[in-house]
Image (cartoon, rainbow, N blue to C red):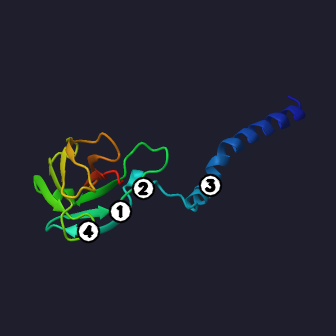
Amino acid sequence: MKPRAVLGYTGATLTLVLAILTPFWLSGFFSRGVAALPLQIDEVITGGPAVRAIPMGAYAIQVHREVSTHMFQSEKPYVQLDWKPAKALPARISDMVDIDGDGRPDVVVNFDVPRDPKAPLRVIVEPQNPHYLALDNVGKPRFSSLIVRVDDAILVRIPLADRK
């Protein structure tokens, strides 16, 4: 083989190796750049920030800030309540919860706590305040009205009534 052909094939091989390895060399640079961006997950997904905790003995109920939906979203505004830790919960929860912190219960939340973390959950919410909507034996049909176990917590989202 002529030296010119050897140089050409060697150059092509080195170019391919460089093209394959460059993303691995630069991945740290790009991941640090993306991590530095001020990106946040939408509150409709996360349930909003927790504003206070209500101690209930062996467990606590975290009350989140009300989540309002954005234009073009089909979800209703809601408030999320977290029962933590799930392993400390009794077999049946029936709690009167003061969501707005005015000293009067706003909702009564009832659900069974199966020991199997993969078992389906159902919740009944009886509003004591017209600001909240009732849930009758609801699982997880929508982001704005659901009950779900996440890690060591049980999350309940209660939709808000339309304000006129």
Q: Which residue is identified by label 4?
A: 53
Q: Amino acid at mark 4?
A: Ala
Q: Are marks 4 and 1 in contact (CB under 8 Å)?
A: no
Rendered location of residue 24, percent (x, y) = 61, 49
Q: Amino acid at mark 2?
A: Glu
Nearest to viewer (mark 4 / mark 3)? 4
Q: What is the C-alpha distance between the residues marked 4 and 2?
A: 19 Å
Q: Which residue is identified by label 1?
A: 65
Crowd band around label 4 with a 10 angstrom C-alpha radius: few (<14), some (14–19), many (20+): some
Identify the element where label 2 is drawn.
helix
Please tell me which residue is depicted at 27% across the width and 66% down the height of the picture.
100
Q: Amino acid at mark 1?
A: Arg
Identify the element where label 4 is drawn.
strand
Nearest to viewer (mark 3 / mark 2)? 2
Q: Which residue is identified by label 2?
A: 43
Q: What is the C-alpha distance between the residues marked 4 and 1?
A: 12 Å
- Rendered image: mark on residue 30: 3
Q: Are marks 1 and 2 in contact (CB under 8 Å)?
A: yes
